[in-house]
Amino acid sequence: MAGHRPRIVVIGAGIIGSAITYNLAIRGADVLLVDEGPRPGSGVTGRAFGWVNVINGTPGESSYKLWREAVSEYRHLKAALPAAFSRVRSGSLFWRATAQETEQFAGLRKSAGENVDLLRRNGIQELEPRLRRIPDLAVLSHDDLALDSAKLAGDLVDAAVVAGASTRFGATVSAIDTMNGRVARIRLGDDAMAADVVVMAAGAGVRALAERLGLRTGLTTSPALLLRYACSRPIISHILRGPRLEIRQASDNTLIVAKSYVENGNENRPWLIGEDTLTVMKDELDLPDEVVLKSAEIGDRPVFADGLPRLGFFPEMGGLYVAAGHPGVILAPLLGRLTAEELLDGQRSELLGPSL
Ligand SMILES: Cc1cc2nc3c(=O)[nH]c(=O)nc-3n(C[C@H](O)[C@H](O)[C@H](O)COP(=O)(O)OP(=O)(O)OC[C@H]3O[C@@H](n4cnc5c(N)ncnc54)[C@H](O)[C@@H]3O)c2cc1C
C-alpha cells in the first residue's frame, strides 16, 4: 500500500531496545516500545556498572573494531542529547598486578591509536588522592564514560516519545503470532497488537520469545554482581580498575562496584560478597566510616559464545529481528543506529557481517 509506514514493535526497554526505539523514532518510523517492567532500564540495564570503554577489547580481534565504533557513537549521541550526559563523568584509571604488565598494556593501546596515557605514581596520586595503595604505573583512558545506564535508557525513551514513538510499560509479550511465514502481531495477555516488524531487544528474554516460535538463538546468560554503597561525599573522580577492585562514584556520591559472580546456593551470598568487598575498598581507598553497603544485586548479562552481539532478521521468519549482546551499554547507541539503517534503508553495516 503506497504511503504505508510499517508498524515496528520493539520488545524490551533496556539500553538496547531504548536506543533502537530512539533511532527509529527520530527518523520518523511508526514504532511501539513494549516492556514488562514499570519503566525503562528495569532489566539488567538497571544493574550495569555503566562503563563505556574499549579497554576490554583486544586490538586485532573481530569485536575490537565494533567496540571502537561503539564508543565513537557516544560522541554523536552526546551531541544530539546533551542533557542526558550532563552528569556523566569521563576517564578511567586501569592497572594490572605488575608495572611491567601495565606498561605492556599501555603500549598495545597506544599503538592501536587509543587516547590513553601512562601515569606514574605522582600523577596517579594527583588525580586520585584517596588511593591508599598507589600502583607504580596506571593507564589513564581519557574517553571512557561512567554513566547511569537506566537513566540513559529513560532519556532515550523520552526523546523517542517526543519524536512520535508510543510506549507500553507493565505489559509482557506472551507470544508473537505469525501468518504465512511472517510476524503478524504481538500478544500481551488477552490483548494483541498488529506488527509488520518485531524487534526482539528483550535481553535475556530473547531466548524464550524465540523458542516459542521454534527458533534457536544461542543466547545464554552470565551473572554479575552490582554493589552499591551509600556515601555522602566525593571520594574518587575516575573509574578505577585494579586487580582487586572495579569501582566508580555516581553523581549522588554512591560508590558502585562490579564483580563477576558464581552461584553457590547461599541466598545471602551477594550481600556477604558486598561486605567483604567493603573491607577491600577500605584497604584500597581512604574511606569515611559512614560508607555502608546499600544493595547487592545479581544481573544476568545476555551473551553469545563468540562474545559478539546479534543484530539482524531471522532468515526463518519474515519481519522478525533480534538485537542482543554484550557489552550492551557500550554497544547500544551503535546497535540502535545500525538497526534503524537496516530496517528503514535496507542497508546492513559491514561491521555486522552478512546476516545472522
Ligand atoms: C554487574 C554488571 C555490570 C555490567 N557492567 C557493564 C558495563 O560496564 N558496560 C556494559 O556495556 N555493560 C555492562 N553490563 C552488561 C549490561 O548490563 C547489558 O549488556 C545490557 O544492560 C543489556 O541490555 P539489554 O537492553 O539487552 O537487556 P535488558 O536491560 O535486560 O532489557 C531487556 C528488557 O526486556 C524486557 N523484557 C524481557 N522479556 C520481555 C517480554 N516477554 N515482554 C516484555 N518485555 C520483556 C525486560 O523487562 C527488560 O527491561 C553489566 C552487567 C552487570 C550485571
Image: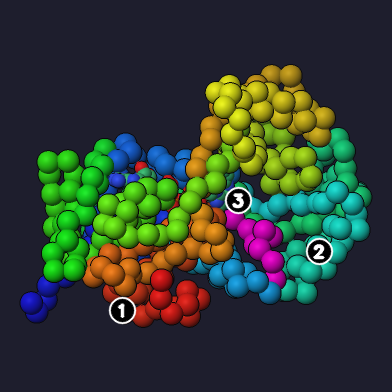
Q: Which residues are magenta?
A: 52-59
Which residue is label 2 attached to?
A: 106
Cα–Cα span, label 3 and label 1: 31 Å
Corner quadrant of residue 240? top right
The numbered dot on residue 174 is none
**Residue 347 visible in the current orientation:** yes
**Residue closer to the observer: 163 or 182:** 182
Looking at the image, residue 249 sits to the left or right of residue 140; the answer is left
Counting residues from the N terminus, which is met first, the one under dot 1 or under dot 2? 2
The foreground one among 211 and 110 is 211
Among the two numbered marks 2 and 3 on one chain, the one whose residue lies closer to the N terminus: 3
Q: Amino acid at mark 2?
A: Ala
Residue carrying label 1: 345
Identified by mark 1, the residue type is Asp
Q: Amino acid at mark 3?
A: Trp
Q: As drawn, is 73 to the left or to the right of 197?
A: right
The secondary structure that most of the magenta stretch takes on is loop
